[in-house]
Amino acid sequence: MLKIYKILSVLIDYPNDELLLNLEQVKSALDEPQCVNNQERKILREHIEWMQNQQALELQGLYIQTFDMAAEHALYLTHHLLGDDRERGPALVDLQEFYKNTGWQAVDNELPDYLPMILEYASNLDEMGARMFLREAVGAISILAANLEKTGSPYAKLMRLLENRASILDAAANS
C-alpha cells in the first residue's frame, strides 16, 4: 500500500474529529522508509503542523469555505474538466465501472471523481500503477492547484505535490 496517497487522501478530505485526533500518527507515518521523499515530507509536515495549530471548528469552517462553497475549488475532478457538461455523467459512470471492474469498493457515498476517493484507490496500487492512474487526472489537479494558489489556500501545496506525483515524466525524480 502506498502511504503517500492514503496520507494525501485524509489530509485533503474533510477534517473530521477522528482525523484531528490522529494527526500525530499521520505525521509519524511520514518517517517510514520509502513513504515520501524529503521535499514531500517537508510539505506534508508543514501542512499537518498548520492543521494542528488550528481550532477544530475554524479548520472545518475553512475547509467548507474552500471546497464546498467555491466551485473552482471543488474536489470533484470531472467538474474542472467538463463543468456541468453532459459528458460529465458518462465520465462518472465510466470511472465507477472502472472501480467495479478492478474489484475495488469505495467505503463512502461520494461521486467516483471525488479526489480523496481517487487517492484512496491509488493507495492500493503499486507506484507506477498509481502514477499512471493519477496521470488521467493531472489536468484537473493542475487547475485545482492553480485555483487554490490564487486564494492563498494552504491546500494548494498538497495539490502541487500530487500534481508532481501524477506526472509520469517525474516518476524517476520523485521515487
Image (tube, helix red, strand yellow):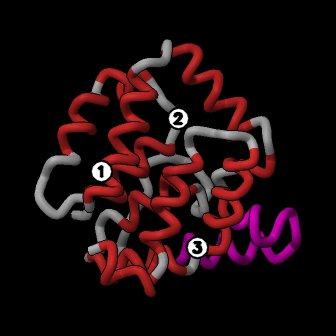
Which image quarter is the C terminus in? bottom left
Looking at the rendering, the stretch of residues picked out in magenta corresponds to 78-99
Q: Secondary structure at mark 1?
A: helix
Q: Judge the density around disc 1: few (<14), some (14-19), many (≥20) Cα neighbours within 10 Å.
A: some
Q: Residue, x 48% and y 30% (percent of image)?
A: 15
Residue behind mark 3: 138
Quarter of the image with the N terminus in it: bottom left
CA distance for labels 3 and 1: 21 Å
Above or below 129: residue 73: above
Q: Position of residue 70 (x, y in %)?
A: 79, 41
Amino acid type of disc 3?
Val
Marks 3/1 in contact by CB < 8 Å: the verdict is no
At label 3, counting other C-alpha atoms closer than 10 Å, the crowd grade (few under 14, some 14-19, many 20 or more) is many
In the image, which disc is placed on residue 29?
none
Q: Earlier in the sequence, mark 1 or mark 2?
A: 2
Q: Position of residue 167 (x, y in %)?
A: 48, 79
Left or right of 11? Residue 76 is: right
Which residue is denoted by mark 1 in the rendering?
A: 41
How crowded pointer 2 is (Cα within 10 Å; few <14, some 14-19, many 20+) is rated as some
Mark 2: which amino acid? Tyr
Magenta region includes residue 13: no
What secondary structure is marked by label 3? helix
Q: Which residue is mark 2?
A: 14
Residue situated in front as seen by the camera: 18 or 174: 174
Q: Where is residue 61, by image quadrant?
A: top right
Q: Amino acid at mark 1?
A: Arg
